[in-house]
Image (spheres, rainbow, N blue to C red):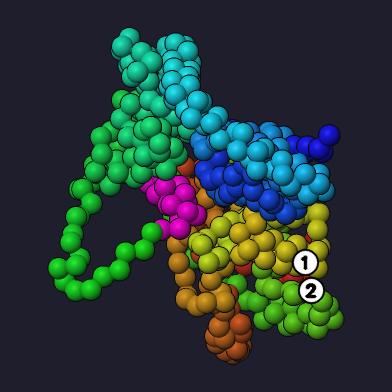
Amino acid sequence: MPALNEARVPDIGDYQDIPVIELLVQVGDTVKKDQGLVTLESDKATMEVPSEHAGVVRELKVKLGDAVSEGSVVAIIEAADAAAASPAEAPKAAEAPKPVPAKLEPEQTQPARAEPAKAAAPAPVAATDTRSPPVSFGADAVAPDKVPYASPSVRLFARELGVDLSQVKGSARSGRIVKEDVQSFVKGVMQGGGRPAVGGAPAGSGLSLLPWPKVDFSKFGAIETQPLSRIKKISGANLARNWAMIPHVTQFEDADITEMEAFRKKLGEENKETKVTPLVFLIKAAVASLRKFPSFNASLDEAGENLVLKRYFHVGIAVDTPNGLVVPVIRDCDQKGLLQLAAELGEISKKARDGKLGPADMSGGCFSISSLGGIGGTSFTPIINAPEVAILGVSKSSMKPVWNGKEFAPRLMLPLSLSYDHRVIDGAEAARFAGFFAQQLSDIRRLLL
């Protein structure tokens, strides 16, 4: 009896119903241990589900567009030794499931389109939910052939953005609507190129903008068209929403890091196995500042009526990768020392650059830091990463003459740019936060208090 093993979705944090966007293997393929079987995509990252066993794929339990969660079975793998023992049977086993997709395809389409009709019945109740804008439709809209073809996770995603799926055109097979279609629709509306999402969209979401200019650039010279990376496509819609929906204000401040930098270099010389960067000091200063000003360690609820104050300190760090910007989160920063933070920062940064981040690595942040100090610049206005209410931008440090009361002395100054949500934080509080943050960096002994 051949040994059959189930390949399951590993721990993906609190995420549920993550859609399958790519099948990396077919029935009959031989796979190695930890080889990717399918690709999943959340609203923040993509990840592959690896095979825990080497062997032959005998059955795929999912298809494109299916929604899976932690523990869902994606494939059946016959152990390598069992597959090698009966090579003559392998082709038969591989061929057997081939007719299945052909038989299932009509069934797959109709139930997927008809199933949401059941969920559409309680629409009057959902319309009163302040967390989700109501979508009005007539009785004929719930007919199976008129219900938009989309998975439950995409329907939930659309409801959260206040999008009427009947106005969205699906780009996947059989006209199925995927998240990218919803994001493209929202982007089109925000740029003035689409219809309003819904009648009851949140206040401020209807922007009266001119249509995006359509230009044939080839008329002016040679051009090259490159598709956006998947990360940029996903983050683009989020950034556009955050910039449009959050009233951003940016407070600028300079921090004297002369002593901090000297201590950092000394610490690095004593601990050469760990790369100690200025970011670890910024993380510790962020924790101290969030303690002092708890409104910065908070989020507005979905209705925008209550402030949720957090008692934990998880800090997001923007990391530049070949595929785009990602923001992994370092957890419980208040419970970790500089060297432990340095080691963890190095690990998660490498994981980000290698494209190995999972949804759990990028969720739960309280406050984000985006550092361009290694590149250059004097200041910038970072975009808040909703549902957070503030983000700190860090530019390149430089030596400047600073008056100490008696004379001008050379000091290493670090430019800070604090963007904050003006619905939650007023200007005076932001100025105090930025000043306190700079003070922590100027005298690192304060981080011990």
- Mark 2 Cα shell of 10 Å, populated few (<14), some (14-19), many (≥20): some
Q: Is residue 291 shown above or below 346?
A: above
Helix, strand or loop under label 1: helix
Q: Please give left or right for residue 148 compared with residue 75 in the image.
A: left
Magenta span: predominant SS is helix
- Could you tell me residue 274's position as x and y percent? 79, 74
Q: How crowded is mark 1: few (under 14 residues within 10 Å), some or many (20 or more)?
A: some
Up the image or down, 54 lies above or below 267; here it is above
Which residue does the numbered mark 1 point to in the structure image?
Answer: 343
Q: Does the magenta stretch include residue 230?
A: yes
- The residue shown at (36%, 33%) is 175
Give the magenta part as a residue range. Answer: 228-245
Q: Where is residue 212 in the image (x, y as percent from the top left)?
A: 23, 51
Mark 1 or mark 2: whose residue is earlier in sequence = 2
Residue at horizontal 19 percent and vertical 55 percent from the top:
214
Q: Which of 45 and 65 is in front in this view?
A: 65
Do the CB atoms of the residues marked 1 and 2 lie less than 8 Å apart? yes
- Residue with the mark numbered 2: 274
Residue at (36%, 63%) from the top-left corner?
Answer: 226
Secondary structure beneath label 2: loop
Query: Considering the image in quadrants, where does the N terminus appear?
Result: top right
Q: Which of these two is toward me, 404 or 321?
A: 321
